[in-house]
Image (cartoon, rainbow, N blue to C red):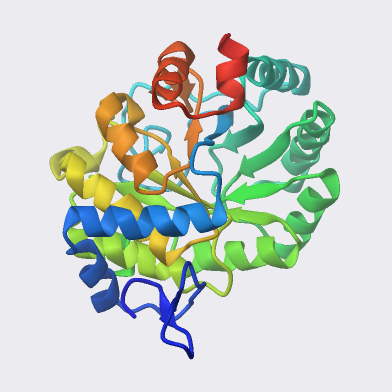
Amino acid sequence: MADGLVEAENGSRKVGTVRHNWVRDEAQALYDLPFADLTFRAQSIHRSRFDPNHVETASLLSIKTGGCPEDCGYCSQSAHYDTGLKATKLMAQADVVATAQRARDAGATRFCMAAAWRNPKDRDLDEVCGMVSAVKDLGMETCATLGMLTPPQAARLREAGLDFYNHNVDTSPEFYDHIITTRTLQDRIDTLSYVRDAGIKVCCGGIIGMGEDVDDRLGMLVLLANLPEHPESVPINLWNEVKGVPVNDTAERPDPIALARLVAVARIMMPKSVVRLSAGRQYMTDELQALCFLAGANSIFIGDVLLTTKNPQATRDANLLDRLGMRSRLNRAQA
């Protein structure tokens, strides 16, 4: 059936059955449902897999900023564009660990380390592995996003204690070449495969608002839902305004209801995945975030900055979750 529910022999429906054979027309049919019907189905599936009143909190740190050789048309860190961002060297491990400890004390349960590389050199990976192990010792889940990996590099990160690897597909296969030319979509999928084979969980989603249409957004979800294993985390990012990048010429902020619909479709198509409201939450009203939680989102990034862009303050997030009666470590940290 087009809603991700399959008929059992007795005619009843099994909620949240995991599928890997979605087609675009099915995703569109879900997206086009009356909003009340769509959110009801998404919330029903959400409740079958998750505590509907709990929100996962994660923190993200740029451990090496700028100077990236990729030409991603949305990115402030690309060396191809004059965005006013100064490239930095890899941070010292002690500074990364100190930042992770502050994030933990502020309510984060997962700490993600991001480096603006096409792919890490082995000597750099040595340092990152040390960071991963040290953050793991703080009792936090660890995540990294370092660009493309080889199978041996993925295995080294797993040995260091890495729990998650983030590597987004960004958009649909059809729209991909409009955004990036220096790395193919298959390059990204290959890295996801290497990460899986190493025993690391996958964090993979994309960005909306770059000039793509609804069909592209749904195509991105179909791509993710048809991977051999669904990503454990699916970040949905709103494009952040960045001066000097090509996406400025095509970007258009999505309609709020359209965003909530997309979250609901993601929840239905990937019932076991954590769906994260990621970059761009500073553009979202409290009411829109509440709608997205109702539609099945259950994770946010906390902290005033995400890599190089703004993020809502922790006090605002804690206040919103309190008003909604939702729980996270953020509430306790801000109490």
Q: Nearer the viewer, residue 48 or 170?
A: 48
Q: Nearer the viewer, residue 285 or 248?
A: 285
Tell me if residue 26 can be seen.
Answer: yes
252 left or right of 262 in image: left
Q: On screen, 202 above or below 25?
A: above
Q: On screen, 334 above or below 78?
A: above
Pinpoint residue 329: horizontal percent, then vertical percent. 62, 24
135 left or right of 15 in image: right
Residue 228: image quadrant is bottom right
Who's the residue at 57% across and 32% down the image?
A: 58
Return the residue found at the far front. 10
Pinpoint residue 234: horizontal percent, then vertical percent. 48, 52
Q: On screen, 235 above or below 245?
A: below
Pinpoint residue 6: horizontal percent, then vertical percent. 43, 80
Tell me if residue 254 can be seen.
Answer: no
> Is the C terminus in the top left, top right, bottom left or bottom right quadrant?
top right
Who's the residue at 38% across and 77% down the image?
A: 22
Q: On screen, 272 above or below 203?
A: below
> Is the N terminus in the top left, top right, bottom left or bottom right quadrant?
bottom left
Pinpoint residue 85: horizontal percent, then vertical percent. 40, 23
Who's the residue at 77% across and 29% down the image?
A: 135
Q: How many marks?
A: 0
Q: Nearer the viewer, residue 88 or 316?
A: 316
Return the residue found at the far top. 335
